[in-house]
Amino acid sequence: MTMQPINNTLLANADPELKKFVLFLLEKLDQQAVQISELRQEIADLRARLNQTSRNSSLPPSRDGYRKVPKGIKKEGSKRQGGQIGHKGNTLHQVDNPDEIVACYPTKCTCGHEFSPHDTMIFDRKQQVFEIPLPKIHITEYQLFGCTCPKCGQITQGESPPNVTAPVQYGDRAKSLVVLLNNEFKLPVEKNKQLFDILYGCPMNEAVVIKTLEKFYEKLTPTEEIIKETLKTEAVGHVDETGIRIKKKLNWLHNFSTPYHTYLFVHPKRGKEAIESELSIIPDFNNWLMHDCLPVYFNFSQVKHALCNAHILRELQAIIDNDDKGTSFWAKQMQDYLLKLHGMDFAQRMQNQLVLNLEYSKICRDGLASNPPAEKVKGKRGRPKKTKARNLLHRLIKYKHSILAFAYNEHVPFTNNQAERDLRPAKIKLKISNSFRSDQGAKHYARIQSFISTARKNQKNILTEIYNTFQGNNFITNPVGFFNSS
């Protein structure tokens, strides 16, 4: 709000009471101008928050509500429903050696003749039914005998296998299923008990489930160390973090991953204290680090930083969606530019690197020109608050080389989706269980989920590898001669 200057001569000659009243009104107008400026900014911030979707922010698609496009509705130009041409598929196929064969012979002809076993039968076709066997607990009893030596008279007793230590206990296959259900399928402890009761008539109590998870956690200690050492040598490391609740308090699950390995750890803090702790891999990592621009990551000067462009594209979309002044043209240009680079052949990028860099800088300059600094409001202390558009532009300029890392380095991907995919199972578990009941329970989950994720990435059977770990080794600790549970 711009006020016309007051003629000082008129005020000097005015009645003292009138002069006092005018000055009072001017002061009020200045206060109102500050309030109007603040309210306008607050309205803009609230409108931007209301406009947030999974397309223009970090909100998950589940938060889109009725704005989310249902899966059954096809967008214009989208692919047809069902398997695409060239898709390998994953359907059932007949096997050569079925477990059971049932011969189906004709008994009576339509003319009334009844066939006998002595009639010649001609094979027509075969049909196979894939069925699961009736669930049943297999109980093995080890009977220990003793014998008196006829030579020395000493009594020698037979020994059960090393893993049989109690009069009654669950076997490693049953324990492996518990680990799989609790971590991979996010089943709460009580639901484990119910499932075992329904399937086998043998409810596994809560203490046994927790003890099983604790034992498996300890068995994975050498496996986790190998995963960590392997990750330290990778060309590109993806890092991210997400909030989890432990005993109803906010903690953080940190992730360092690649396409073949996953490492997760839990820490009460999100920033420097956690990322520089002994649990973190980053202090010992020296190659490309892909992240979402959390400032603390830039404290590590020994790594080469690459930024997630999925985050950048969403922020640019937010600028476009909340533009009411027609100044977001640069955001659309930057979106098109990044997507063009992403779709361009690597050799072509390298050949046109100078031109592409100049184009990037021009878009940033045009953006700054269309989004000038906010004017200082009279009566309001401090520097004017920067708009989201200007903040993003400054970040695009400052971290240009990190944003364009994917364009000129073959090993660096366009996004940090790898880290986000590896963290997503934790959010599903929290939606089911709401909160971890103890710090140790959260640590158990992190280590076990690291192993399960790594096994899946290497196309291993998860249940088999859990069982192998209970037996003593898995595909990581003994990659040549690991056990087979079949």
Image: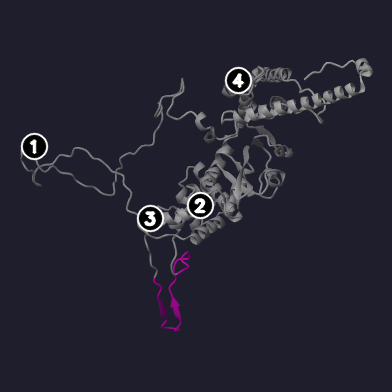
Residue nearest the observer in this picture, 376 or 27: 27
What residue is shown with label 2? Answer: 474
Which mark is on residue 336? Answer: 4
Question: Which quadrant would the N terminus be assigned to in this image?
Answer: top right
CA–CA distance in space, label 3 to label 1 = 47 Å
Q: Secondary structure at mark 3?
A: helix
Residue range of the region highlighted in magenta in the rendering: 143-166
Nearer the viewer's eye, disc 2 or disc 4? 4
Residue 158 at x, y = what percent?
Answer: 43, 73
> Which amino acid, by three-letter code, is at mark 1?
Thr
Can the viewer see residue 228?
Answer: yes
**Picture residue at 58% right of the left edge, 38% below the top:** 420
| Of the image marks 4 and 1, the number of the one nearer the N terminus | 1
Please tell me in which quadrant of the rendered image residue 136 appears: bottom left
Would residue 365 be counted in the magenta stretch? no
Relative to 96, does residue 52 appear above or below in the rendering? above
Q: CA distance from mark 2 to mark 3?
A: 31 Å
Badge 1 marks a residue whose secondary structure is loop
> Could you say where residue 15 lies in the image, as x and y percent from the top left?
92, 20
> 10 Å neighbourhood of mark 2: few (<14), some, or many (≥20)?
many
Residue highlighted by disc 3: 198
Residue position marked by numbered label 1 in the rendering: 110
Cα–Cα span, label 4 and label 1: 71 Å
Q: CA distance from mark 2 to mark 4?
A: 46 Å
Distance Cα–Cα, label 3 vs label 4: 55 Å
Q: For this view, does 200 lie left or right of residue 444? A: left
